[in-house]
Image: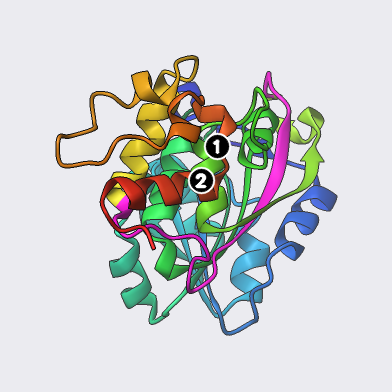
């Protein structure tokens, strides 16, 4: 057993029943391309590499990569920081149009990984990923709730999000200090809610929630230009947490003169 490295957020899965349940949550067929994020000691990796003919695992820890290459010589292990992964190049190397992603995410970079998946959404079919339970709750949160925020809006606009099941602290070594949950993300080929300018939409969402206690007329003031129309009356006095994901899309398009 490897000694977990705290700065890498390593908590290794050890319970066979939980491991099987996670692998079974993937909807991928045997010929589909599957990518594992952070395999660690290979709790999921052995089952995945046996089940899927096109499989790759991305691991930043050379100790873990050495272990996996020794124990699972048939598995493709990519020594890389997941945040530096070029999903398009990876899909090309595997020979896949769409990827199925699975993994136990390092909790301290969960948000960054999620935004990386969002940026690569056209290449992602689904993701089955473990994260802190409170973060999972944010992904499915509804407007006018405390958990509703940037991640809620961004993920709900891009994909179908479901919390699959909670994961006990007792199935890890070492035991994490927080609760965990498995989450399923389903990315449609054509997102149902897309803005004319996705980059501006993301800026709009971030800016609104960065000052979530302020009304939109105040929180968005620094990104509104002279070329943009004034905020609609029914929204100018609202706060970010009151807008649905669709409201943000409509507002972004309206400000850029792209409303229907």
Most extreme residue toward the top is 213
Q: Secondary structure at mark 2?
A: helix
Q: Position of residue 179 (x, y in %)?
A: 73, 27
Relative to residue 260, is residue 113 depicted above or below?
A: above
In terms of depth relative to the viewer, which is nearer, 234 or 182?
Answer: 234
Image quadrant in which the N terminus is located: top right
Mark 1, Cα crowd under 10 Å, few <14 / some 14-19 / many 20+, is some
Image quadrant in which the C terminus is located: bottom left
Model colouring: rainbow
Q: Which residue is mark 1?
A: 243
Relative to residue 153, is residue 249 depicted above or below?
A: below
In terms of depth relative to the viewer, which is nearer, 88 or 45?
Answer: 88
Q: Which residue is mark 2?
A: 247
Horizontal side of residue 28 vs 18, given as left or right: left
The verdict on residue 206 being magenta is no
Q: Position of residue 173 (x, y in %)?
A: 69, 30
CA gap, disc 1 and disc 2: 6 Å
Most extreme residue toward the bottom is 31
Q: Position of residue 166 (x, y in %)?
A: 80, 39
Q: How many marks?
A: 2
Instruction: Give me the residue at 46% from left, 75% from top.
Output: 98
In terms of depth relative to the viewer, which is nearer, 103 or 197?
Answer: 197
The verdict on residue 189 being magenta is yes
Q: Quadrant of residue 209?
A: top left
Q: Which residues are magenta?
A: 176-198
Relative to residue 99, is residue 236 depicted above or below?
A: above
Q: Are marks 1 and 2 in contact (CB under 8 Å)?
A: yes
Most extreme residue toward the front is 233
Q: Secondary structure at mark 1?
A: loop
Instruction: Give me the residue at 42% from left, 69% from top.
Output: 123
């Amino acid at each position: 057993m490897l000694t977990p490295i705290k700065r890498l957020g390593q908590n290794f899965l050890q319970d066979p029943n939980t491991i099987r349940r996670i692998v079974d949550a993937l909807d991928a067929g045997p010929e589909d391309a599957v990518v594992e994020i952070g395999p660690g000691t290979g709790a999921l990796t052995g089952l995945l590499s046996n089940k899927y003919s096109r499989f790759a695992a991305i691991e930043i820890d050379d100790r873990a990569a050495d272990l996996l290459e020794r124990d699972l010589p048939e598995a493709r292990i990519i020594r890389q920081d997941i945040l530096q992964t070029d999903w398009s190049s990876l899909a090309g190397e595997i020979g896949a149009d769409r990827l199925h992603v699975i993994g136990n995410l390092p909790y301290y970079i969960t948000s960054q990984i999620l935004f990386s998946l969002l940026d690569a959404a056209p290449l992602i079919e689904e993701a089955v990923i473990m994260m802190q339970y409170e973060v999972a709750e944010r992904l499915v949160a509804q407007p006018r709730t405390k958990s509703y925020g940037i991640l809620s809006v961004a993920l709900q606009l891009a994909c179908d999000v479901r919390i699959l099941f909670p994961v006990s602290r007792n199935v890890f070594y070492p035991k994490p200090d927080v609760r965990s949950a498995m989450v399923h993300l389903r990315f449609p080929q054509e997102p149902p809610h897309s803005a004319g300018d996705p980059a501006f939409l993301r800026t709009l969402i971030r800016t609104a929630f960065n000052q979530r206690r302020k009304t939109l007329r105040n929180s968005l003031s620094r990104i509104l230009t002279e070329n943009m129309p004034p905020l609609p009356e029914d929204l100018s006095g609202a706060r970010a947490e009151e807008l649905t994901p669709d409201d943000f899309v409509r507002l972004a398009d309206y400000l850029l003169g792209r409303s229907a």
